[in-house]
Amino acid sequence: MNRRPAFCAEDEFSLLVVSPRTADAEVLKAVLAGTDWRVESIAPDALGDRDVNGIGCLILSQEALTDTLRAQVAEHLRDQASWSELPVMILYAADQDGQQIEGLLRAEWRRAKVILLRRPVRPLDFLAGVQLAMAGRLRQFSIRDQLVREQELRRELNHRVKNILATVRAIGNMTLRKNIDAAAFSDYSDRLAALAALHEALHLSPDEVIGFADLCTRLTLPYLEDDATRFRAATDCPPLQPEAAHTLGLCIHELLTNAIKYGALSVPEGRAEADLMLEADGRVALLWRESNGPPVAAPTRRGYGTRFLASSLKSVFGTEPALTYNRSGFALQVTGPADRLLTQPGPSTRG
């Protein structure tokens, strides 16, 4: 018997049989009757309305593999979550070419684990194939649950950090009641509030979005509130995906702090700007430029900050950034596909 893990819901421990022949479906259900798996059979024309992402395994007879059904399965597979690779078992006739069927389906169903069994198949071989598919599927559901728990822990950590910052601010307000310069303390309090906003911007939940310019504004508030015109951010892009926003936020923060310590923003007349723009070919370009700062020279070795920028931006854009150490100012440029960064890639506004 196959015992369902505690984390697995009832429908996720089920098998969905799709066959135009009721008798074939009943035979498969009879073979599986001795297991703990719940088995449901439907006609091919009913698959389009079903949510198959939660089931354990999809079992199809060759007779069900019409062009329409293959297209419906392909659509279901495209809509899968990133952790999912739905197992699909095909029972095909002995007079058919299994390699040809496998090649066709693997080309159309790129996000499925395809298992082919030639009929007539022994019940023991059929059960072994289903067992193998379900074991892999349950590992996928386990990964999904781990991701959900990780997201909840991130939210809890974000909540606790915000509470800590609020507590620090409250302690500061109590300190203000003593003989402390009110104007100076107000700057401190505002910077602390901006730091809380920065933390919140870098820990978006999956259902939250933020624009690039808004993200940059939150990042600069703790540092340049005395003269916000020294930094400019612009974009013609839709909002960022949460993971992309988190990574870009960390990278912009790294560039910003470097500019404040050593670059253009370390002197009063220095300026920095960041642009995220759609190119003519639909790709997205991130540009960072510094000007009017101290003379720039290329470093003799690659430090942690540079390695962090290179690896982080490559994870988002798919390519490493180009770093330019012009004497007039440091610059960075990187481009990548819009669907890796944006919630809804739109038409280009640049020539």
Image (cartoon, helix red, strand yellow):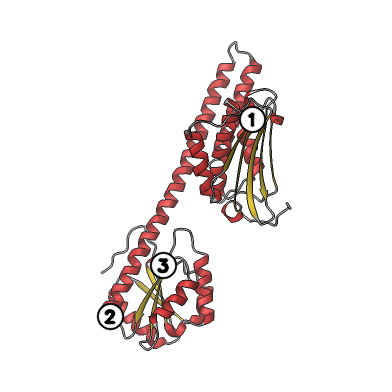
> Residue 85: percent from the left, percent from the top?
43, 64
Judged from this view, the residue extending furthest toward the top is: 179
Q: Is residue 101 left or right of residue 75?
A: left
Location of the N terminus by quadrant is bottom left
Q: Amino acid at mark 2?
A: Pro
Label 3, residues with CA under 10 Å away: few <14, some 14-19, many ≥20: some
Q: Earlier in the sequence, mark 2 or mark 3?
A: 3
Q: Amino acid at mark 3?
A: Asp
Q: Is residue 327 above or below residue 309?
A: above
Residue drawn at the location 59% of the way across and 17% of the way down: 176
User: CA separation, marks 2 and 3?
Assistant: 23 Å
Q: Is residue 135 left or right of residue 322?
A: left
> Residue 12: percent from the left, percent from the top?
40, 65
> Residue 74: percent from the left, percent from the top?
51, 71
Q: Earlier in the sequence, mark 2 or mark 1?
A: 2
Whether residue 141 is visible, yes or no, is: yes
Whether residue 243 is visible, yes or no, is: no
Which is more toward the observer, 12 or 129? Answer: 129
Q: Please tell me the numbered disc located at residue 11.
A: 3
Q: Amino acid at mark 1?
A: Arg
Badge 2 vs badge 3, beta-carbon distance below 8 Å: no
Numbered disc 2: secondary structure: helix
User: CA separation, marks 2 and 1?
Assistant: 74 Å
Label 1, residues with CA under 10 Å away: few <14, some 14-19, many ≥20: few
Which residue is labeled 2 in the image?
A: 123
Numbered disc 3: secondary structure: helix
Badge 3 vs badge 1, beta-carbon distance below 8 Å: no
Mark nearest the camera among 2 and 1 is 1
Q: Is residue 314 above or below residue 179?
A: below
Which residue is labeled 1 in the image?
A: 327
Query: Where, by quadrant of the figure, is residue 196 drawn?
Result: top right
Mark nearest the camera among 2 and 3 is 2
